[in-house]
Image: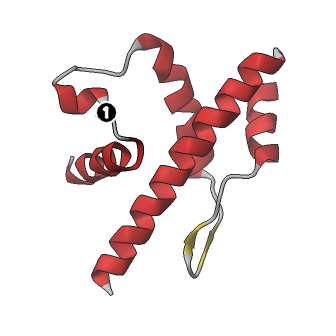
Amino acid sequence: GAEQARLFKAIHEGEGRRHPAQLEQPALPGDCIRYWQAYGHLSAARPWSSVGPQALAVSEVAALLTMLGIQDGATRMKYLRLIQRLDEVERRFIQSQRQAKS
């Protein structure tokens, strides 16, 4: 609910575009769901330190893509690019929330 709304707002501010959920669309476009799900799997297992979440390792993305059977180089790079961008926006969002509480 509220935390997702804050994340969507951070994505909008970070990328200059609105998340589909903010445009009263019921779901992500079908071709985006697989990237969001892959990111969700990786993000749930991310390492944290005293300063917050750590960046997702490229090796972790590569391992997940191998497990999913994704071998095409261009497709793997697209996954990596999108996952890294989502990761960057989420880590910035979490950091801003931590700073606001300080």
User: Depth check: 99 or 60 in front?
Assistant: 99
User: Mark 1 highlights which residue?
Assistant: 19
Q: Residue at x 75, y 28 (%)?
A: 65
46 sits to left or right of 59: left
Please name the amino acid that badge 1 sits on.
His
59 sits to left or right of 86: right
For the question of whether residue 68 can be seen, the reply is: no
Label 1 environment density (alpha carbons within 10 Å; few <14, some 14–19, many ≥20): some
The image shows residue 21 at horizontal and vertical percentages of 25, 30
Q: Residue at x 75, y 52 (%)?
A: 57
Quadrant of the rendered image containing residue 41:
top right
For the question of whether residue 32 can be seen, the reply is: yes
Residue 79 to residue 92: above or below:
above
Residue 68 to residue 94: above or below:
above
Q: Residue at x 75, y 24 (%)?
A: 76
User: Depth check: 12 or 48 in front?
Assistant: 12
Residue 53 to residue 42: above or below:
below
84 sits to left or right of 20: right
The image shows residue 88 at horizontal and vertical percentages of 54, 52
The image shows residue 59 at horizontal and vertical percentages of 82, 45
Q: Residue furthest bottom?
A: 102
Quadrant of the rendering where the C terminus is positioned:
bottom left
Quadrant of the rendered image containing residue 26:
top left
**Could you say whether the residue bearing mark 1 is in a helix, strand or loop?**
loop
User: Depth check: 36 or 45 in front?
Assistant: 36
Total of numbered circles in the picture?
1
Q: Residue furthest front?
A: 16
The image shows residue 72 at horizontal and vertical percentages of 81, 14
